[in-house]
Amino acid sequence: MTLGRDSNGHGIDAFALEGRFCDLPDRKRGEEMDTSAEEESNKLVYCVTDVPPWYLCIILGIQHCLTAFGGIIAIPLILSRGLCLQFDGLTQSHLISTIFFVSGICTLLQVTFGVRLPILQGGTFTLLAPSMAMLSMPEWTCPAWTQNASLVNTSSTDFIEVWQSRMRALQGSIMVGSLFQVFVGFSGLIGLFMRFIGPLTIAPTIALIGLSLFDSAGSSAGNHWGISSMTIALIILFSQYLRHIPVPFPAFSKEKKLHTSRVHVFQILPVLLGITLPWFICYLLTIYNVFPTEPNQYGYLARTDVKGDVVSQAPWFSFPYPGQWGVPTVSLAGVVGILAGVISSMIESVGDYHACARLSGAPPPPKHAINRGIGIEGLGCLLAGAWGTGNGTTSYSENVGALGITKVGSRMVIVASGVLMVAMGVFGKVAAIFTTIPSPVVGGMFMVMFGVIAAAGVSNLQYVDMNSSRNIFIFGFSMFSGLVIPNWIFKNSTAIATGVIELDQVLQVLLTTSMFVGGFFGFILDNTIPGSKHERGIVAWNKAHEDDSSNTLESGDVYNLPFGISSYLSSSSWLRYVPFCPPGKPDSLDGADLDALESKQQLGPQRPSQIIVGAAL
């Protein structure tokens, strides 16, 4: 073992442990690297099963928290509009604390018992769209007096009932919808779903998540275009122009003593730096009363004291608990809308698992690990609904990308991130500080973030033959329908009148959810209009997610359950047919053990029976 530095020059003085997973599996075996520099760039400092020193786990864990923090805090801030909480900073801080707390718990569950890859869990934008569609229904429209800061008394029972009744309706819908994800995951049905869902379904679904939120971004940014433009410019500067420029930092090691180490700060924390500087500038301009002091004047919402002295009012410690907003209620319309978001979240997570495995030096995830991962995500959504985040949880693609930057793929780093997020959820002052971010700064962040989400959806078309008029038609029609139909329904909310109130509500939520409309048309057209699998992108899509290596020693080391659970389960022969249980792990490849491994490999064709057994259980 030798002291080393990661190939991006991040100055991580740590042991570069030797291991069988420490080369990223970007190329097939036997294929030579083009240059030695390219080979060096694919080496990991720590692999998925390695345990870095405790201090390195904490430092990199903080980095992962900061990478995800933009997306995590954005969700409560957006939901606050639909919950009538724009002017209640203290309640917003409670929501932020709750979503951090639940995200930490779900991360620990996923890394320990789920897919077992270094992948962070956090709030999901796929559930945000149907949630906002549900809250826009006539029965949940915010009273006019809640839109006026001077008329809102945040401690009055009337105001508390206004927002808590909406939150309870969201909670119940999310909890019931998450049961579907739990069933699909633990029964192994996710494999059946993926047979019919290709890039032409995923692309409009994910792209419309970002595009449908343009109104929230524009409304927040429009409160002061100067501040929001500065935020956008800084995020673009840090994330695109300065990302390859390392910044020297003082460091200390036993060998080199005190020295400077170059760290790619702009590549690691572009969003955090991009909103911190405008936030600080707004604070200074607020102190010197440069911004207007009258609520009805343009630029007032750029002040950092709009929500009062929320930091001093917030408690030092607050422990979120299930049912803290009351007993959840369930509506059929809300559940159906949430189901559309849950399906999109599952599809996205399967892709994240494969990307995370590649970047962390692990073998491709086997079926049992994927089934457990989806099932645990469903359980995470159930917990998020019970705790009252107003959202669910999903795997964070941003943190998967961070693995490629830091070259540290250890799952112990993500365990540290989960513990840190739980701690952030308990410290009430931390969440209260985030609520003082001015609205224009948040709007600038939204414009960049939602644009990237839309582009990430479109990037799935790389697998599709876009020279085909068939594919151009399907994608174009799906995208345009996903924008036109919800917009028309919003403007003509009384047009849906079937005579059955429950059916009207279901149609109202579904047809005002852009991602459902676009994904529905993409799914139907892609599976009914004649086209070859190569033309549809199915071949390239499957190739990118193939290589099920569930019976290799390496796969067992990474994906088997901890604490000897896998060994205990392997003692029962019938459990091998349960979709989320790993196969028995051989101790070596000698003699009888080799025969045992070969016998397990012969069980591959029987895998479809796992779906039946899982559903029966």
Image: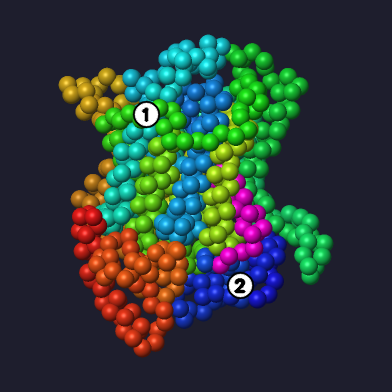
The numbered disc on residue 327 is 1
Total numbered circles? 2
Residues packed near mark 1 inside 10 Å, few (<14), some (14 to 19) or many (20 plus): some
Q: Answer with left or right where residue 217 lies relative to residue 53.
A: left
The residue segment tinted magenta is 50-70
Q: Is residue 179 above or below residue 444?
A: below
The numbered disc on residue 203 is none
Q: Is residue 74 visible?
A: no
Quadrant location of the N terminus?
bottom right
> Between 133 and 254, which is closer to the camera in this rendering?
254
Q: Which residue is mark 2?
A: 17
- Picture coordinates of residue 474, whole percent (x, y): 29, 47
Q: Is residue 578 above or below residue 588?
A: above
The structure residue drawn at horizontal position 51% and vertical position 75%, both measured from the top left corner, is 20
Residues packed near mark 2 inside 10 Å, few (<14), some (14 to 19) or many (20 plus): some
The structure residue drawn at horizontal position 37% and vertical position 29%, both measured from the top left corner, is 327
Specify the principal SS of the magenta part.
helix
- Picture coordinates of residue 149, whole percent (x, y): 55, 15
Q: Is residue 612 above or below residue 525?
A: below
